[in-house]
Image (tube, coloured by chain):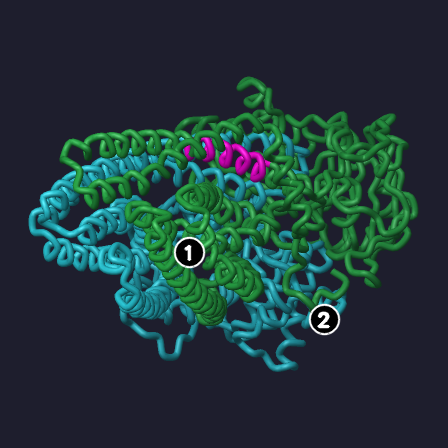
Amino acid sequence: MTSPMNSRHQLLPVASGRQVRDALRALMSPHGLLAAGAATMLLAGNIAALVGPPVLGSIVDRVVEGADEDALITPVLILLLSTLAAAVGTALGTSLIAQLGEAMLARLRERVVERALHVPIGLVERAGTGDLVARVSGDVSVVSTSVREAFPAVLGAGLTIGLTVVGLGVLDWRFALAALCAAPIQALTLRWYLRASGPVYASERAAEGELSQTLYDSIDGASTVRAFRLQEPHLTAAAAGSEGVVRIALRAANLRTWFFGWLNLAEFVGMTAILVAGFLLVRADAVTVGMATAAALYFHRLFDPINTLLALFDDVQSSVPALARLVGVAEMPLSSERIEAAAPADASMALEGVSHAYDAGHEVLHGVDLRIAPREHISLVGASGAGKTTVAKLLIGAIEPTEGHVCVGDVPATAIAPEALRRTVAMVSQETHVFAGTLADDLRLARPEASDAALRESLTAVGALGWVEALPAGLDTPVGSGGHMPTSTQAQQIALARLLLADRPVVILDEATAEAGSAGARTLEAAATTVIEGRTSVVIAHRLSQAVEADRIVVMDAGRIVEAGTHDQLVASGGAYARLWTAWASARE
Amino acid sequence: MVPLVLGQAIDRAIEPGDWSSLALWLGVLAVVFVWLSFSWRYGHRVAMRVEERASHDLRLLVARRVVHPGGGLSASRMPGELLNIATSDARQAASVAVLVAANAAAVAALLVAAVILLRVSPGLGLLILAGLPPIVGVLHLLGRPLEARASREQAEAARAAGIATDLVSGLRVLKGIGAERAGAQRYLHASGASRDAAVRAARLFAGYEAMAMLLVGAFLALVAYVGGRLALAGEISVGDLIAAVGLTQFLIGPFTRLAYSGAMLARARASAERIAAVLATPYGAEGGDTLLPTPQGALAFEGVTHGTLRDFSLAVAPGEMVSIVAPHGSDAQTLVQLLAREDEAASGRVLLEGAPLPSIDLAAARAALVVAPHDAAIFAGPLRENLAPWSPSAADLERIAEATAADEVVGALPEGWDSHVTERGRSLSGGQRQRIALARALAADPPVLVLHDPTTAVDSVTEARIAAGLAEARPHRTTIILTTSPALLAASDRVVLVLDGQVAAEGAHEELTHTSPEYREAIG
């Protein structure tokens, strides 16, 4: 975010064309056999379908010759059989293609979500979850449509066209040549169209992304919009975004009509060429009228697939930016792909000369030194904006220091595999999120193999078992979006229960008890005491009743540590902490 | 038209080898193409315009419903789901416009073809025209299970997208406990289910397509056979035979389109139903038609029983600053829901300026009474934009920033009030967001302002500053604070303790700390 005013959202990476191709190849490679099977079936089906026009042509020939009626039976039977073969081949081919496409698609979106969950949190905070949400839902749906509809159709149409041109050549090579008269016009049209429409589609996608971000902001903050009667500005912004999308979509539609206009011209030229060729060839007795008919029918039959193919270039093209956005996320390096991997020696933590700036040149933390012994309880206090949360984010590895080192168990955090780091440090902040699903599912995110008894035990420890058992289906009650919405105290109890289940040697509580009223806060404080028991802990709390109990209180101000010591020492020294304590205690006298 | 011209060209020009006739029919072909091209071009543009406008209108209808003053929607749906409905479903539902145009074109093509066929040979024409509708009928019947599959496929896809959205929204929490892998695993299951549903739907679709191909192909063979016999008998010309076969082959297009449109219509309908469900969600509160021209700021509860409240009564005088201490979160929550008009009192009355809330025009009620949500959203954009609707003067802005300690927040940002904040204000810390939200509430300057735990994320020194600032910032305005913070309580004119859904004690903070052990317990 070097210049936050330049762009509204710092976007996540978008893959280059080459990366997209490589990624597709990698996705395809495990399914070689399936792809071969699908191609064979489609080919067989299309060859069978090719039999139609010459057979119809032979019927015309027999009519012209004035053969007897029984002579029609054989061609008609052939026609029926070829239709059957074409139907079966195409059906098998398309379902195999679907299987292939869906498998690749599923793998891709799974990778996208996996990477999305593993990206450094700071990056997501800047790009906005809206962008990520748009990628995992909107872009996935665009690419899905393309995989489900455009891709098989393009393949089928391509095969039909190729084979039909071969069929024309089999009738007489000059027919194939005549049909190819249309090709230059089609090629030029396509080239022009791809060039003209590329930027239009890119801006269409951008406008749609902007619109979803705008809508998401309003939807997510709907209660605030209602409370402050902000409907007017929000709906105006949504309308403006939506109008932008409409304008660009119509521009694209306009281009499309020109595109098809040119294609019609190509059809006309090709048809004329075929008819003239047939005329000349029949006159020269090189082909029969039936063959000329077959040639004309062949070419006429090409109209649909050619239009399909060229038109779907459109769909495929519009899905390319979406695909690039998906691959962009899917190909983000997993930070665990680090070569050297050391293990933390113990449950100590340290900040060594750590400075941090979220925006270049705007440092919020200045040369902080802090050593935390194994199982030491630290309480971090100070005014809002003093840098406490930044320290917490550094300790958990959510952000990396601009200068200095973060050490976990005497090993620099950068040398530890993120997986190992995650097994060492866990954090609960004041931001709560209850994941949609049953309460048991939610808790098991922290320890997937936990038994129901273990879940109950952790809920008991944070004092939540009472209300959980009162839920309609206990642990199996759906919670989160679309289910039971726990109060903020309950949500934090769930978060602390998850922390217990995760069972990490180091825990960080950043305002984990702040959201509740004071009665709730006391419940949560008791829960927090249980959670930090026997672990290294850093607790950030504005309620100083929590600080009193700590082994050491560290006071921060304006990005620096200004005092450290026990409660009694600091109160006696009459510094910043003593002032905070006086303000806190006097209100409670 | 094209097959007809082809048939005539082959019959009249190629067979006899007549140059002038070839030229004539090529000319006719040219005219047909020009006509075709132009009518399609304008038809398509019109249909697209209709689709895009409809899609736009639907998007805005959904957005309007979501932020409607009556509320009632947010609790039951994920934001991601609503976003999907406002974007993807709006588009899908609007695609009916182009579908209808395409179907109309298909029907017109069928009619023209019918007329031509009947003129060529009444017998053959009747065969084709009588034979095709049953085929379409059968195809339609066969297509019916596709709709169910398609909607299951969509439901699975939506579920997977919902889970992805949910996980991404809770990403910070997920990362806090190192559960990225478990989360990814959960998505893996949903994505797999979605894939399987999609493959099943695609197989069914392929089978359906094969049946359609087979039926139409068999019919084509029949037409060729009958046409061939008629031509052999000399009842129709070779050109007519080619036209008949060509038209039958051509007709596969419009017919398949018509048959497919069932499935597409089903998708569009499913989307339209989801949109309709959102639009039809009952409002949490309905407004009456009482307007409040000059609200003074009087608020009263009269025997309200709702949620955890039992026969709750409380009167707040204009200009008063009252704090309500409700140690049980659900009491506070119920009060907030009633005042924010997210819910109606089951019994008893809430009076604003002496008028029951449900009788007051919603807009008027929300203008006179603002409930600042505890989890208020700070919107993306320059910080200043969040206060822009009330366009505070520079002096007011300074006064408000000082009263809410937002001045420290703004001072710490690189570009002050012009600094850009990311969505939901996530580039700010919790305490910073709370102060900006508080500044916005003061900028709105309503006659009655309700604040729900406004200072939970700020330190005690800043909290003391805010408490003093609040008391001065709204001299003749009513302010109600739901809090247990001693600093805010001490700054209030009056404090009300709510226990078991009823007022248990009231008085000044000083007084209650001495007289009420429950009060001391509640704020400790």
Amino acid on which disc 2 is placed: Gly
Q: How far across and down, in percent of the image, does residue B366 sit?
A: 41, 67
Residue displayed at 35% across by 33% down:
A86
Determine if the magenta segment contains residue A310: no
Disc 1, SS: helix
Does B374 sit above or below residue A46? below
Identify the residue under disc 1. B86
Residue situated in front as seen by the camera: B48 or A421 = B48
Quarter of the image where the C terminus of chain B is located? top right
- Please state the extent of the stretch shown in magenta in the rendering: A94-110
* Residue at the far front in the pictured view: A284
Q: Chain of mark 2?
A: B
- Crowd tier of the residue under label 1, counting other residues whose Cα lies within 10 Å: few below 14, some 14–19, many 20 or above: many
User: What is the C-alpha distance between the residues marked 1 and 2?
Assistant: 34 Å
Query: For the N terminus of chain B, which image quadrant?
Result: bottom left
Along the line of sight, the residue nearer the viewer: B160 or B39: B39
Q: Colour of chain B?
A: cyan
Amino acid at circle 1: Ala
Number of numbered labels in the structure image: 2
Kindly tell me whether residue B265 is visible in this rendering: no
Q: Earlier in the sequence, mark 1 or mark 2?
A: 1
- Considering the whole magenta stretch, tell me its main secondary structure: helix
Asked if the residue at tag 2 contacts the one at tag 1, i.e. Cβ–Cβ closer than 8 Å, the answer is no
The chain letter for the residue carrying disc 1 is B
Residue A174: percent from left, percent from top: 44, 51
- Please report the residue visible at 84 percent of the width from the left and 32 percent of the height from the top: A339
Residue that mark 2 sits on: B416
Colour applied to chain A: green
